[in-house]
C-alpha cells in the first residue's frame, strides 16, 4: 500500500462514526393490536401496562407475584373521565389476578401534579396499597402552597405515614451512579424472579444544582425517576423531568441509566426528552403517555401540544427496534398538529389506546396496543 493510499484509508475511517449498539430486531418487538384479555397468563417476568388515562400518566407493572403502580393519571374533561377509566382498568386487572388480593405492593407518585395524582384517592380507597413512595413535596419547594395535585398526595402521605408505609425520597439520598433502593422502594420478590426497583432522582430541598429560581420551583424537576429491572432488562420512568433536570440526572448517573424501555418524559413535551438522554439510554422501545389530539378542550393534549414533533423525532431516532409503520398525529405547537410516520418502536396512548409491553423469559419485548 502506497503512502498516499494509506492516508486516504485513514481519512475515511476517521470520518465514519463509531458503530452504535442496536438491539437486533425480532418478531417479539413488533406490535400486535389487541390487549391481553381476561384469560391472559401471568407473565413469567414483567408486563408493563401504560394505561390510556388521557392527558396524564398511570403505568401498572405486573410481576409473577405482585403489581406496582407508578402515577395515577389523568385527564378530566366533558369527554373523558380518567378516574373511571383507571378504576375500570384496575378492577379488570384484579379480576384476572385474583392471587394478588386487590393489592398494589407499591404506588409511586413521581410528583404532585394533578395529571399524575388525580386517581390517587380512588386507588387508596378501593385497593390495598402496601407502600407509598413520593418526593415528599406536595406543597412545592416553599412548603406552603399546594401543587395542582398536591392535596391528593398530601392526604395519601398522611394516611400511609400512620401505617409506617410512607417513603419520601430526597435527591440528597440518591447516590450518584447507583441510585437508591430499600425494602419500601422495592417490596417485590417473586420465587425465581427478583425485580429490582430503584429511584435515581428525588425532591430537592435546596437548590444544590445551581438552577435558576423558576427551574428550581418547577415541580416537574423534582420528579422521582424510577427504574424497574427484571433480569437486566430495565424500564426507565422519568416523570415530568425537564431539560435542566435531565442534564443533572445524566451528570449524576450516566450509563447506569441504560434501559431497554423508556417511558417518555413529560408526555412527549418539547422539554421532556433530550438527544443526550436517548444516547445514554439506548432503548429498544419507548411509550408516550398522553391524551388524544381529537379532544379539543382545555387541559388536553390538544391544548398543550403533546407530543411535540421534535420530541417524537428525537425519541424515534434513538430507538434500536422497529415496529410496523404507523401514521400518527404530532404537534408543531399548541393546538397545531400534522401527520408523522413511525417505523421505530415508539408507541403512544393518544394514538393507540392502552399500550402493553411484555418481557419474556429470554429478555425480549413484545408490544400490544388497544387499537
Image: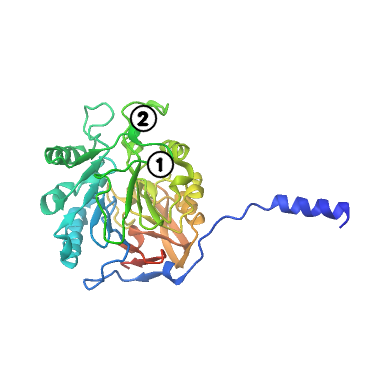
Pointer 2 or 1: first along the chain: 1
Q: Position of residue 326 (x, y in %)?
A: 43, 66
Disc number lying in front (2 or 1): 1
**254 displayed left or right of 150:** right
Seen in the picture, residue 258 relative to 360 is either above or below; the reply is above
* Label 2: which secondary element: helix
- Give the CA distance from mark 2 to mark 1: 23 Å
The local crowd at label 1, few if under 14, some if 14 to 19, many if 20 or more residues have their Cα within 10 Å, is some
Q: Which mark is residue 178?
A: 1
Q: Residue at x 43, y 53 (%)?
A: 259
Question: Residues at badges 2 and 1 in contact (C-beta under 8 Å)?
Answer: no
**90 displayed left or right of 363:** left
**97 displayed left or right of 296:** left
- Colouring scheme applied when the structure was drawn: rainbow
**Depth order, front residue of 209/88:** 209
Quadrant of the image occupied by residue 349: bottom left
**251 displayed left or right of 137:** right
**Depth order, front residue of 191/278:** 191
Q: Position of residue 221 (x, y in %)?
A: 36, 37
Seen in the picture, residue 367 relative to 142 is either above or below; the reply is below
Q: Which mark is residue 74?
A: none
* Label 1: which secondary element: loop
Q: Residue at x 24, y 44 (%)?
A: 184
Q: Position of residue 14 (x, y in %)?
A: 71, 50
Question: Can residue 162 be spotted in the picture?
Answer: yes
Q: Give the residue at mark 2.
A: 216
Question: Can residue 52 be spotted in the picture?
Answer: no
Q: Position of residue 70 (x, y in %)?
A: 27, 50
Amino acid at each position: 500500500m502506497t503512502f498516499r493510499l494509506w492516508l486516504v484509508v485513514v481519512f475515511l475511517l476517521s470520518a465514519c462514526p463509531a458503530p452504535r449498539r442496536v438491539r437486533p430486531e425480532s418478531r417479539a418487538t413488533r406490535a400486535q393490536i389487541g390487549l391481553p384479555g381476561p384469560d391472559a397468563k401471568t407473565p413469567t417476568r414483567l408486563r408493563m401496562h401504560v394505561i390510556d388515562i388521557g392527558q396524564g400518566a398511570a403505568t401498572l407493572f405486573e410481576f409473577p407475584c405482585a403489581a406496582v403502580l407508578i402515577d395515577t393519571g389523568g385527564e378530566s374533561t366533558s369527554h373523558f373521565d380518567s378516574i373511571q377509566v383507571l378504576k375500570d382498568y384496575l378492577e379488570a386487572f384484579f379480576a384476572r389476578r385474583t392471587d394478588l388480593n386487590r393489592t398494589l405492593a407499591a404506588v409511586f407518585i413521581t410528583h404532585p401534579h394533578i395529571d399524575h395524582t388525580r386517581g390517587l384517592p380512588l386507588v387508596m380507597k378501593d385497593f390495598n396499597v402496601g407502600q407509598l413512595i413520593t418526593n415528599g413535596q406536595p406543597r412545592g419547594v416553599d412548603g406552603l402552597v399546594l401543587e395542582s395535585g398536591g392535596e391528593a398526595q398530601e392526604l395519601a402521605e398522611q394516611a400511609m405515614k400512620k401505617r409506617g408505609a410512607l417513603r419520601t425520597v430526597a435527591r440528597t439520598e440518591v447516590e450518584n451512579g447507583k441510585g437508591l433502593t430499600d425494602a419500601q422502594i422495592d417490596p417485590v420478590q417473586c420465587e425465581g424472579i427478583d425485580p429490582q426497583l430503584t429511584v435515581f432522582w428525588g425532591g430537592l430541598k435546596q437548590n444544590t444544582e445551581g438552577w435558576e429560581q423558576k427551574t428550581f420551583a418547577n415541580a416537574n424537576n423534582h420528579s422521582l425517576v424510577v427504574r424497574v429491572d427484571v433480569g437486566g432488562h430495565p424500564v426507565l420512568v422519568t416523570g415530568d423531568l425537564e431539560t435542566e433536570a435531565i442534564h443533572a440526572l445524566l451528570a449524576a448517573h450516566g450509563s447506569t441509566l441504560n434501559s431497554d424501555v423508556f417511558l417518555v418524559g413529560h408526555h412527549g413535551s418539547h422539554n421532556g426528552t433530550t438527544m443526550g438522554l436517548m444516547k445514554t439510554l439506548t432503548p429498544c422501545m419507548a411509550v408516550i403517555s398522553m391524551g388524544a389530539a381529537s379532544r379539543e378542550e382545555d387541559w388536553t393534549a390538544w391544548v398543550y401540544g403533546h407530543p411535540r414533533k421534535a420530541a417524537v423525532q428525537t425519541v424515534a431516532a434513538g430507538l434500536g427496534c422497529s415496529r410496523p409503520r404507523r401514521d400518527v398525529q404530532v404537534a408543531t405547537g399548541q393546538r397545531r398538529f400534522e401527520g408523522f410516520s413511525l417505523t421505530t418502536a415508539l408507541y403512544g396512548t393518544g394514538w393507540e389506546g392502552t399500550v402493553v409491553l411484555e418481557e419474556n423469559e429470554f429478555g425480549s419485548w413484545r408490544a400490544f396496543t388497544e387499537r
